[in-house]
Image: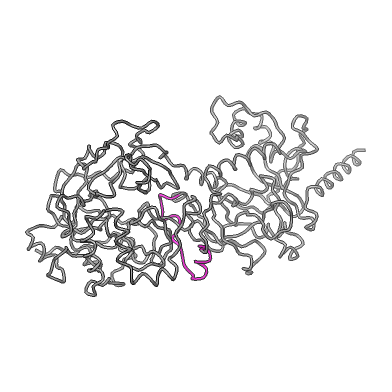
């Protein structure tokens, strides 16, 4: 009688497996769980053998995933979340991986941890959270899937802005380009928690090579990584690249291996290679043993890294784009990927705006200008508009504290500085005013307005100011003062003629981080002369922490010097991830017309910052840049080393 009962149970189990499997694919199991014949209210527990130690496993950041042995489907432990062979799980309904998990499930404190995994609202549970009542596993999986979908919607990972005629994948593949890794951009989403994502990592993605009416998935490996974008190849294609495809690794359809089993989604091999193997489970076990995949909480980390503290209607102080020497009050109109569209408070039609990143040194909390002695344009609006409120000071980027008590910058000291009105040039400059908290007002020699309206504010630790001789030792073209006739320019002669002294070298920021950039790397970069635009760009030169950024398709005169930690640089795929519009390389027709209209274009771009007052000085700078005697020096001085070697020349006596 007992033997008959055992045979009946075995037959029922085999029949259930058949129902669970994808019969049209030679018995390939879809990894779905059968819960139609059981409910949590009348479950009976039955001990079975523990998980076989001989099963192959994949280790992922300390978490163990056990994969099928070719004979049985998979199950997910409702207590610890472990994925393993279904028949090796504890109880008839296979809800737990071990006796200890089954017993722990009855503990209120443990049930609270399940609530944290399965709650839908997206908020962490409180101590007063009610303990979950027993529910069918399907309901819990559905709740978990909905929770994940909520996180992904919050992160806006589905928002993709296509650029007609341009594809990062095709652009990189056709030219064998390399892209700067995400870890180079600490301010970008996932920049500080990218981890070991690299070539060879396996993920679960939608199977597009399938004729089924429902959405199914398959496992793919990363063949090439370019920023957030990954070139993927389905498992089983070996060296066949015919169905390789690019996708954003932070997208909502990219999951760690094991997600399908946890979510009850089917894994189906692509139709093109369906005939290659009769036992796909055994194939996966062999291929995935020892492989790496995404962290289980990857999508949650993406969502969290795309939560921005700045909100619309916040009031800030920002540089006045028509008079760099002062700030104005502006209101946050929109936030996209951490970039802020600020509308000056006095703009009635909201067209007078300014774009910058929330970590930009150009924005500050209300009251900052007064606290350090910076010029400030008072608004004609006497009181805040309804709904507007001051952004809290702690949201803004903190600058390094400095000790100005001893030897410090003084008015009249000479230095070299990136010209904010022409970011391709490093110019002879002068400290015009020393403000509080380490801030300095800098003027470009020979092209300053009489009223100082074109002075600009740099902090003493800014990577955009340099000691005298920086350009010479690093073979960078130094733009001399307007009207200075004694060429080539020599600092020693100039200091003597102007009866001035150079700012001491020790006052400048000489820290060089291990940034990871290399010449030739692709990225997405803001055109700081028109900061609403994010463009396809290339790193063309590296001088310690200083990067020369070239905008693909445009002439070199539009290049910009940018710090390696600038919040205006982003990984490939950032625009697609955040929903920002990417500007593709200039078409051939535009490049052909640049030589005849480059000066007019450059002047138009510069007007955003300076208005009409600066036009004559900018024209002079363009003439100097066009002259052969000031041609850009290449190659020999490029410092791709990220060390902090001494890179300043000794000042002549």
Instruction: Determine if the magenta segment contains residue 180.
Output: yes
Residue located 40% across and 40% down the image: 310
Count how many numbered circles sit on residues in the image. 0
Residue 54 visible in this rendered orientation of the protein: no
Image position, residue 370 (x, y; %): 22, 37
Direction from residue 189 to residue 599 in the image, left or right:
left
Residues 53 and 43: in front is: 43
Q: Residue furthest front?
A: 349
Q: Residue furthest top?
A: 128
Q: Quadrant of the N terminus?
A: top right
Instruction: Determine if the magenta segment contains residue 510.
Output: no
Residues 101 and 43: in front is: 43
Image position, residue 504 (x, y; %): 15, 55
Q: Residue furthest right?
A: 1
Image position, residue 12 (x, y; %): 85, 43
Q: Is residue 635 above or below residue 89?
A: below
Image position, residue 438 (x, y; %): 21, 45
Residue located 44% across and 59% down the image: 583
Colour basis: one colour
Direction from residue 51 to residue 542 in the image, left or right:
left
Residues 28 and 542: in front is: 542
Q: Quadrant of the C terminus?
A: bottom left
Please tell me in which quadrant of the rendered image residue 550 appears: bottom left
Residue 354 visible in this rendered orientation of the protein: yes
Q: Is residue 606 above or below residue 146?
A: below
Q: Which residues are magenta?
A: 166-188
């Amino acid at each position: 009688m007992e033997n008959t009962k055992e045979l009946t149970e075995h037959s029922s189990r085999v029949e259930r497996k058949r129902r669970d499997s994808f019969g049209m694919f030679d018995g390939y199991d879809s990894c779905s769980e059968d819960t139609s014949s059981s409910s949590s209210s009348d479950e009976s527990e039955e001990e079975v053998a523990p998980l076989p130690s001989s099963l192959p496993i994949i280790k992922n950041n300390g978490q163990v995933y056990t994969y099928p042995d070719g004979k049985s489907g998979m199950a997910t432990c409702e207590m610890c979340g472990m994925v393993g062979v279904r028949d090796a799980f504890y109880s008839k309904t296979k809800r737990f991986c071990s006796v200890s998990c089954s017993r722990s499930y009855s503990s209120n404190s443990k049930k609270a941890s399940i609530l944290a995994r399965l709650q839908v609202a997206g908020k962490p549970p409180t101590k007063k959270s009610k303990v979950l009542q027993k529910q069918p596993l399907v309901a819990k999986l559905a709740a978990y899937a909905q929770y994940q979908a909520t996180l992904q919607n919050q992160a806006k990972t589905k928002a993709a802005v296509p650029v007609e005629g341009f594809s990062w994948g095709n652009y990189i593949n056709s030219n064998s380009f390399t892209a700067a890794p995400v870890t180079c951009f600490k301010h970008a989403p996932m920049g500080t928690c990218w981890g070991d994502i690299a070539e060879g990592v396996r993920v679960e993605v939608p199977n597009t090579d399938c004729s089924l009416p429902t959405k199914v998935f398959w496992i793919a490996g990363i063949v090439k990584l370019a920023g957030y974008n990954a070139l993927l190849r389905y498992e089983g294609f070996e060296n066949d690249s015919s169905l390789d495809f690019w996708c954003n690794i932070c997208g909502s359809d990219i999951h760690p291996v094991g997600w399908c089993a946890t979510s009850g989604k089917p894994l189906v091999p692509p139709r093109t290679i369906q005939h290659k193997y009769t036992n796909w489970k055994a194939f996966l076990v062999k291929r995935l043993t020892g492989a790496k995949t995404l962290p289980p909480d990857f999508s949650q980390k993406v969502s969290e890294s795309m939560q921005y503290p700045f909100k619309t209607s916040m009031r800030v102080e920002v540089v006045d784009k028509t008079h760099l020497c002062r700030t104005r009050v502006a209101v946050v109109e929109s936030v996209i990927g951490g970039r802020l569209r600020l509308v000056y408070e006095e703009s009635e039609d909201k067209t007078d705006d300014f774009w910058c990143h929330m970590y930009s040194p150009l924005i500050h909390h209300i009251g900052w200008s007064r606290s350090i002695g910076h010029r400030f344009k008072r608004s004609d609006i006497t009181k805040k508009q309804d709904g507007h409120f001051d952004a809290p000071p702690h949201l803004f980027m903190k600058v390094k504290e400095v000790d100005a008590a001893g030897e410090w910058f003084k008015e009249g000291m000479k230095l070299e500085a990136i010209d904010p009105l022409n970011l391709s040039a490093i110019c002879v400059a002068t400290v015009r005013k020393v403000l509080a908290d380490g801030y300095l007002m800098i003027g470009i020699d020979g092209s300053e307005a009489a009223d100082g309206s074109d002075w600009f504010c740099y902090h003493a630790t800014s990577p955009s100011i340099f000691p005298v001789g920086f350009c010479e030792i690093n073979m960078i073209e130094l733009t001399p003062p307007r009207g200075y006739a004694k060429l080539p320019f020599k600092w020693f002669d100039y200091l003597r003629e102007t009866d001035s002294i150079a700012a001491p070298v020790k006052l400048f920021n000489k820290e060089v981080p291990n940034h990871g950039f290399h010449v030739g790397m692709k990225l997405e970069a803001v055109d700081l002369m028109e900061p609403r635009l994010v463009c396809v760009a290339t790193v063309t030169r590296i001088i310690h922490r200083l990067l020369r950024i070239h905008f693909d398709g445009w002439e070199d005169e539009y290049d910009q010097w940018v710090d390696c930690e600038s919040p205006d640089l982003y990984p490939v795929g950032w625009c697609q991830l955040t929903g920002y519009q990417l500007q593709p390389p200039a078409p051939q027709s535009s490049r052909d017309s640049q030589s005849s209209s480059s000066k007019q274009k450059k002047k138009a771009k510069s007007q955003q910052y300076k208005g009409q007052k600066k036009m004559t000085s900018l024209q002079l700078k363009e003439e100097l840049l066009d002259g052969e005697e000031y041609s850009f020096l290449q190659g020999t001085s490029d410092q791709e080393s990220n060390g902090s070697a001494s890179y300043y020349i000794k000042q002549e006596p």
